[in-house]
Every structure is written in structure tokens, then in C-alpha cells.
Amino acid sequence: MNEVMAALAKEHTQVTFVKLEAEAVPEVSEKYEISSVPTFLFFKNSQKVDRLDGAHAPELTKKVQRHASSSSVSAGSNDSVKEDLNVRLKRLINAAPCMLFMKGSPKEPRCGFSKQMVEILNKHGISFSSFDIFSDEEVRQGLKTYSNWPTYPQLYVAGELIGGLDIVKELEASGELDTVCPKAQKLEDRLKILINKAPVMLFMKGSKQMAKCGFSKQIIEIINSTGVDYETFDILEDEEVRQGLKTYSNWPTYPQLYVKGELVGGVDIVKVGMGESCLRCKLTICLKL
């Protein structure tokens, strides 16, 4: 990773790269919750805007390129940026009937409080989706202000904040937790609902606004060229859906495009098997029907 940083420093001369030994600056490590090395922190205008935990050279390169190429935000546009973030936070909070914002994932919690929260929800058979706040520093900091709740994990039901671990423990002790949170839905039923959420549904890595893999980016560009409305689902935000849909559709990779609940295929099928003009025709006919 030192070699990667050295190469990135040569490529992006406008960016300052600094390396610190975590043990030598414990106050810094504590302030920014450095739990493993290497950890990369990104700052802009003296504010931390992103982070990357672990030795992931491709991801570090992408993050550096994205932040280095983004234009500086003027003071006059701060309100619109804040509004955009609030819209994104609202969408994430309402991504599932029960949403848990935690450190890590349900399979691999990265703090004791998150682990306890997951254990309680699983014990009661509660259906929930999760978001790893370590994966997005903007969400991690913004949600504290948006919800007026300074710590994690945070549990939301039907878009409303329930609270953190202490609140959930109180609800469990009083017997209210089972009435507040939705019970687990069969995965197959949930997948059917998601697939039929819109006439044209794309399951991808990322979103319309920001694809997180080259294949997802390619298929979005093709669908956008048709002018047809479509909805997307970010499989990176829900591991259960990500793995379950592969089996349900008998299609092992992403993205996956569905029209009227029927699987069309991935990017290769759309590009080669159908072609853009044929895809436009199929999507338009389905929407008219």
C-alpha cells in the first residue's frame, strides 16, 4: 500500500499524502476510530469526507481519483449539497421497513454494540436490512445530524428512528419489540416484491447516480439511452438480497435486469443478445401494456 500511495502521489500532485504510525499518535487514532491498519482518511477543506479501512488498492485508487477530480464546492452551494445528502439519507432510511445503521455487517459486526443489536433482532426473528456506516463517511456523519442521534447503531422502522442499543434493550424487556419491528419475511416473497416493484427493475452495484462497478455503469448507460423509466436496487446495501437473488433467478452475477417481473439478463445479454434498439422496443412495449 505504501507503493500504491507513492504512485497516486505522483499522479495527483494537487493532493497531499501523509502517513502516520497509528501507535505513535494515539489521540488521532482514538478521534477517528482507527480500529485496524492500514486505514485511509480523506480530508477536504479541513473536514473529513471519506475513509477506507483495510488494504484495498483498487478501492483506494478509485476514492483518490474521485475526490481529486471533484470540483471544490463553493460556499453558496452548501445548502444544495446538504439538501442532496438529506434526500439520500431519507432514501437509505426507507430502503427497507426495518433499517439498521451499524458498524460492519450482520455477519461481521465491527463493534460490540452493533453485535449485540444484531443478536437481539435475530433472536426475535425480526426482518431487517443494514447499512455499514464504515463504507460511507458522508452517511456516517450526516445521519448523526439528520436523526439528532450521535452514536451507532441506529435502528429505524418505517422511516422513523427507534433508537440505539439501550432503547432496543428496553423495548425487548417490556415486550414491545415484537410489536414495533416487522417479523422476518420469507426471502422468496421479498424477492418477488422487489422484482415487481417497478415495470423495469435493475439490480446493480450502486445506483443510477453512482454505479459502483463497470458492468453496472455500462447497463445504466444503455437503459438511459432508451428513455424508459426504471428503478434500481443497490445489492451492496443488502447482502441477503445480493446472495438470495442469484439462487432465485439462477443467474450468478450482477447487474440483473427485470421487465414485468421477468429476468432479461445481465449486461452481456443486453449488449449482445438484444441490442440497444431491441431493448428500447421491449421496454416501451412492456410499459404500454
Image (tube, rainbow, N blue to C red):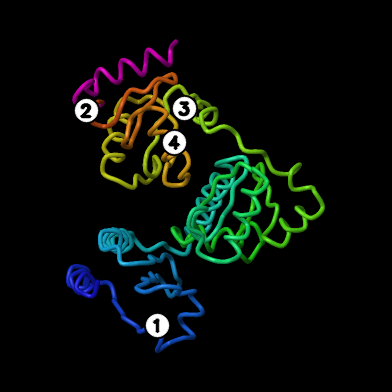
Question: Is residue 222 inside the magenta stretch?
Answer: no
Give, as a three-letter code, the residue at label 1: Ala
First-in-chain label (3 vs 4): 3
Callout 2 secondary element: helix
Give, as a three-letter code, the residue at label 2: Lys
Give the residue displayed 43% in from the left and 63% down from the top.
74
Mark 2 sits on what residue? Answer: 271
Give, as a three-letter code, the residue at label 4: Gly
Mark 4 sits on what residue? Answer: 244
Give, as a three-letter code, the residue at label 3: Ile
Give the residue displayed 42% in from the left and 28% down from the top.
248
Question: Is residue 276 inside the magenta stretch?
Answer: yes
Instruction: Work out how far the residue at label 3 is from the one at label 4, CA to CA, in angstroms.
Output: 12 Å
Instruction: Work out how far the residue at label 1 is from the one at label 3, CA to CA, in angstroms.
Output: 46 Å
Instruction: Work out how far the residue at label 3 is from the one at label 2, CA to CA, in angstroms.
Output: 21 Å
- Extreme residue in the bottom direction: 24
